[in-house]
Image (tube, grey):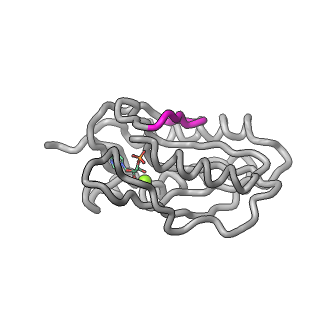
Amino acid sequence: MLIDEETLARRVASLAAELHARCPPDAPLLLLGLLDGSFVFLADLARALARRGLDPRVELARTSLYGGAREASRDVAVLHDSREPLTGVAVVLVDDILDTGRTLATMVERTRARDPLWLASCVLLDKPARRQVKIAADFTGFEVPDAWVLGYGLDHAGAGRGLPYVAVLDS
Ligand code: IMP
Ligand code: MG
C-alpha cells in the first residue's frame, strides 16, 4: 500500500480547505472531473467542499490518448466536455493523476479559451518523473514515485478502481 484510507481522507479535507481559501468567494464553483479515473476523488472532494459550506456544481469530461505507438507522439482527444457556459464561473479541473501532463494541459487550454472567471487544476496524485509537457497542478494531493498506481479510482486494465486506498502495482 502507498497511501491508506485515513491519509487520503485527511488530504482530501485539507485540499478542500486550500481550494476554499483560494477560489473567488462569490462565484459559482464548478468541479469538472476528468473521467474515468477521477470519479472517486471527485466524489470525496465535492463532499469535503460541501462540509465547508460550499455547493459546487459537478460536471464530467472524458479524454482519451490516441495515435502513435510511441507515447511521446500521442495526442489527447476530448470525447465529452462541460456543456454549460463558463462565463462568471470558478472552474476546477479535477483529475486522478498528473502523469505526462498531456491530458491536463489540453483541458486547461480548452477550458481557459471558454473564459471562466477563474480556473484551477486539482489532482490527487502527481508523478513528476514522467512529465512530457511543462505543467504543474495548482492543487496536488500527493507526489508518487514513477510506478503504476491503482485504487481510489485509478485502474490497471480496468481493475482496482474500487480499492479504498492507493497501491503500487506488483510487477
Ligand atoms: P497524462 O499522461 O498526464 O495525460 O495522464 C493521463 C491519464 O493516464 C491519467 O488521467 C490517468 O487516468 C492515467 N494514468 C497515468 N498514470 C497512471 C497510473 O499510474 N495508474 C493509473 N492511471 C494512470
Ligand atoms: Mg485519467
Tag count in the figure? 0
Identified at 75% across, 64% down, the residue is 85
Image quadrant where one finds the C terminus: top left
Identified at 64% across, 61% down, the residue is 58
The picture places residue 49, in percent across and down from the top left corner, at: 66, 48
Image quadrant where one finds the N terminus: top left
The picture places residue 91, in percent across and down from the top left corner, at: 69, 51
Above or below for 169 versus 156: above
- Kindly indicate the quadrant of the structure image that contains residue 8: top left
Q: Residue 47 or 132: which is nearer the viewer?
A: 132
* Magenta segment boundaries in residue numbering: 133-141
- Kindly indicate the quadrant of the structure image that contains residue 130: top left
The picture places residue 26, in percent across and down from the top left corner, at: 85, 48
Q: Is residue 59 left or right of residue 125?
A: right
Name the residue furthest right. 26
The picture places residue 4, in percent across and down from the top left corner, at: 37, 39
Identified at 29% across, 42% down, the residue is 167
Identified at 68% across, 49% down, the residue is 112
Q: Main secondary structure of the magenta part?
A: loop
Queried whether the magenta region covers residue 10, the answer comes back as no
Above or below for 9 versus 162: above
Q: Is residue 146 left or right of residue 91?
A: left
Name the residue furthest left. 171
The quadrant of the picture showing ligand 2 is bottom left
Q: Is residue 137 left or right of residue 85?
A: left
Queried whether the magenta region covers residue 138, the answer comes back as yes
